[in-house]
Image (tube, coloured by chain):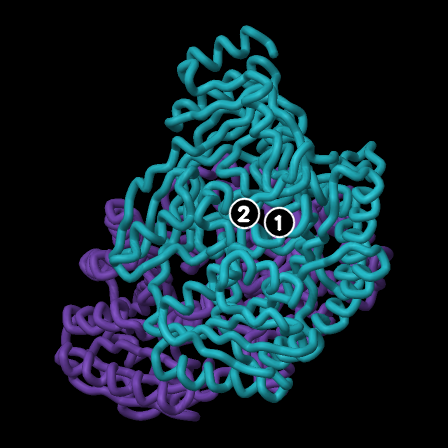
Amino acid sequence: MDSRLLQDLKKLLGSEAVLHEPEDLMLYEYDGSVEVARPNCVVFPRTKEHIVGLVEIANRHKTPIVGRGAGTGLSGGALARRGGILAIFSKMNRILEVDVENQRAIVQPGVVNADLSAAVAHTGLHFAPDPSSQKACTIGGNVSENSGGPHTLAYGVTTNHVLELEMVLPTGELIRIGSSALDSPGYDLPGLFVGSEGTLGLLTEITVKLTRLPESVKTLLAIFDTLDDTTETVVDITARGITPAACEMLDGYTLRAVEAYVHAGFPIDSAAVLLIDVDGVREGVESQAEEVAEICREHHAREVRVAKDSRERDLLWKGRKNAFGAVGRLSTTYYVQDGVIPRTKLPATLRRITEISERYGFPIGNIFHAGDGNLHPLILFDARDERQLKRVIAAADEIIQFCIEMGGSITGEHGVGMEKDRLMPLLFSEADLDLMRGVRDAFNPTGLLNPEKIFPNKKGCGEIHIRPLPVAGVSVT
Amino acid sequence: MTTASKTATSRLPDVIGAEHVSSNATDLSAYAIDQKLPSVIVRPGSTEEVVEIVKYAATEKLALIASGARTKIGIGSPPARYDIALDMTRLNRIIAYDPGDLTLSVEAGVPLQKVAEALAVHRQFLPLAAPFFDRATVGGTIASGVDTPLRQFYGTARDYVLGMEFVSGEGVRSKSGGNVVKNVTGYDLHKLMIGSLGTLGVITRLNFKTFPMPAASRGFVATFETLDRAFKMRNRVAQSPLTPMTFDLLSPRVADIFSSQRAGQLTSSTMPAGVFSSGQWALAIGYSGKDNVLLRYEAELRRMAAESSAAAVIVLEDRDRAAAFAFKREFIPIALESSPAATIVKISVLSARLKDALSGAIKAAQLPWAAMARSLGVIFFALLPPDLSQASHRQLASTTDQILAAGGLLGANVTIPWCPSEWKSALKIWGPERHDLAQMQKVKKVFDPLCIFSPGRFMGGI
């Protein structure tokens, strides 16, 4: 660790806001994925002036800088792959303005997702993107990753809710893009920056849309005896033109783990369940819930339960949102994929995942956003065993390969980060990637900001960047 | 057009085949943009041909402007250069449509109408109910960035475009996004294409989310003596749990321009009697659902209209509803044909300031005007001068300057998407200079380093 760099950082932020001892840095070499990368130092900026100063220091010392929210990311997006400065936004967590009339909020990037919704709940509004990690993850992280969540099926992902961004470019300029009013003239720069995984700028302020809470919500739990019946139900709901607010699937394996952990009331002897929200005006919700229940029954649902009240509903959703954590109780490590497929291909894809699970001998739990075809197969393995690690990657790659063959994508909401960069050529030509790299280089010309993310190293040869974890690296997401 | 440009473009038939190249004077005049003529029109039939043409243009430093049906070609600054008119209408196939997955992939030149027909077979639709609907292409609609009344519920194109293929300024075929409803793989470059007026690339393919048609839809129109009353109702609806599909406020003169013969032709419809009344403000609200939902909306809207002292209300079904919707959709084309010098000012503002922004524009107007305001916070303020005279020009320039100034105080985005070519250079059609222009210039340089795409047509001379 360069002592002059450290000195500069301490001068800017105060020594209590700079960590550099190995035992401190170890805590920041992980995120929610299985990737590992240790920064040279960890800093806690408190103001946008600090961010400007940090970028200036990073430039002066030619040291990479990486922004990070709560570190719940699932693709290594907020890991310091090339070392350098890891800037944690947890102290920039103020909600700067709530404009109820115009349904807008301006927040600092470190505001926790669920805190914004909680802060405006009394006005009948909420921030619609709801990643499962919403109690911990930050809005800055959501913007960087273009996060989704169960209810993005009806409400859209983060990019659909972001209007204006203020950020510091790697060149040190503080810029604002977009506008709080709709239809900001010119190119849709927020559209480019949202989901750019922290490779274009360090966020300092975010203006988001707030969405009115629906008048009425009904939560259904449909219980099935076979996986095929479950997936066919999803296909049918979609094909009949019903868009529930959320349509989540949990297979039997995951259910049992969740039930043992959360006691949400999931039937542990079933093959799978669908957790479905319908919302809107009261009258519409009644008939849509009935319609959905009917489709479930047509596909041999053993039972369709409707949550009686908000307590029951919250419990079911608590089960869903803590599912990754619950699975962590079964295995030292898991590897989660984020492939997307056309909804019509769900039954075939789940069958293939089962087959891959059997062939490789790894248990695979499936808990995912069935309504938008966004899979999350959780492959359980022991990362301390190097051979298992190689095989788990091979199994995961087979799943991704199948998603792509089905016309899908390699990531629906977790991002590419440092986990999937090597898979990018499966979807994009070198020309496609070069244009994207060109855009990155226009804003991040020296690669100072979050280097070696998203795009495969041109010289690289599909190296696997995964290393065994020293202890069970399970995060609650 | 320069001699050099003529000589260079004369080799285009070798690139794509003579039958798809034309430099016939009559043909060329149909492709004029702000009175500037291209040297040649080229009609590619595939992405590969677009690549070849763009490569050729890049080598020869020829300016290329892509267009579809050219219905919205008037938007933007006058081109600095214009050699090749790239007519995309031969790229008009629906490439893939998966009704079960509700996804669609089309070539850029496919007409909106053709897409609507293909989707209707499966009781689905694309919420791209954009103006010039009966002629416009999908690519042109996206590149021009026009909105639709359906944005109230379905958002704008950026909310339902899933991916695109395009040819960048060095003739490289590229893509971003995909054809699944959720995807964060790579940068969303396609979002930059929306509303970019062809300055970043030639869009060749577009992927969309499609949507199920609602069980049934109704229109509700309430008319009011005053703007205050209309806003009283608008605010009540906006604060209610109702989630209408469309929600627009129409100014008193709209009834007059909607009743013209030309309006009927543009919409292929007849406005049902008694919907809009001359001299009255009108709130036009569309809603959808099953019978019990429709009844709830009607009851609540009637109550709110009565509480807001509406002069009259009418509920529209079936053909009448579709007709009223078509007139709203075609407000801009109808307004453009209502005056020889029609000018449309677009004011986007926070929704709570919509009334202030609209009142400000009305106060500034020194010419006849008509307005359509989307409740979300977007006003299309049509100024309708009687002629192209100097006096009209002066009044228009002074009016738009005042609207710009008033908009600035309200934090609004004010632009002038449409105005007579003759007056364009004298008006601030892109509004005040934006603080993020430098970032846009960086983007332009990556996509089109040689500046061959629609040079000068975009904000800040891009």
Q: Is residue B120 left or right of residue B176?
A: left
Instruction: Give percent across and percent down for residue A95.
Output: 32, 42
Q: Is residue A391 left or right of residue B332?
A: right
The chain drawn in cyan is: A
Q: Single out the mark in the foreground, 2 or 1.
A: 1
Residue at 52 percent across and 11 percent down: it is A6
Q: Between residues A93 and B304, which one lies in front from this camera angle?
A: A93
Residue where numbered disc 1 is placed = A328
Q: Between residues B148 and B17, which one lies in front from this camera angle?
A: B148
Instruction: Give percent across and percent down for residue B238.
Output: 27, 68
Residue at 72 percent across and 42 percent down: it is A421
- Residue B333 visible somewhere in the drawing: no
The mark found on residue A476 in the picture is 2
Residue at 60 percent across and 26 percent down: it is A26
Instruction: Give percent across and percent down for residue B368.
Output: 25, 67
The reply to whether discs 2 and 1 touch (Cβ–Cβ < 8 Å) is yes
> Mark 2 is on which residue type?
Val
Disc 1 secondary structure class = helix
Q: Is residue B382 left or right of residue B301?
A: right
Q: Quadrant of the C terminus of chain B?
A: top right
Indicate whether A437 appears above or below A266: above
Instruction: Give percent across and percent down for residue B111.
Output: 62, 74
Q: Quadrant of residue B303?
A: bottom left
Q: Is residue A92 left or right of residue A84?
A: left
The colour of chain B is purple
Disc 2 secondary structure class = loop
Task: Name the subunit of mark 2.
Answer: A
Q: Residues within 10 Å of mark 2 (few under 14, many from 20)?
A: some
Indicate whether A154 appears above or below B166: below
Task: Name the subunit of mark 1.
Answer: A
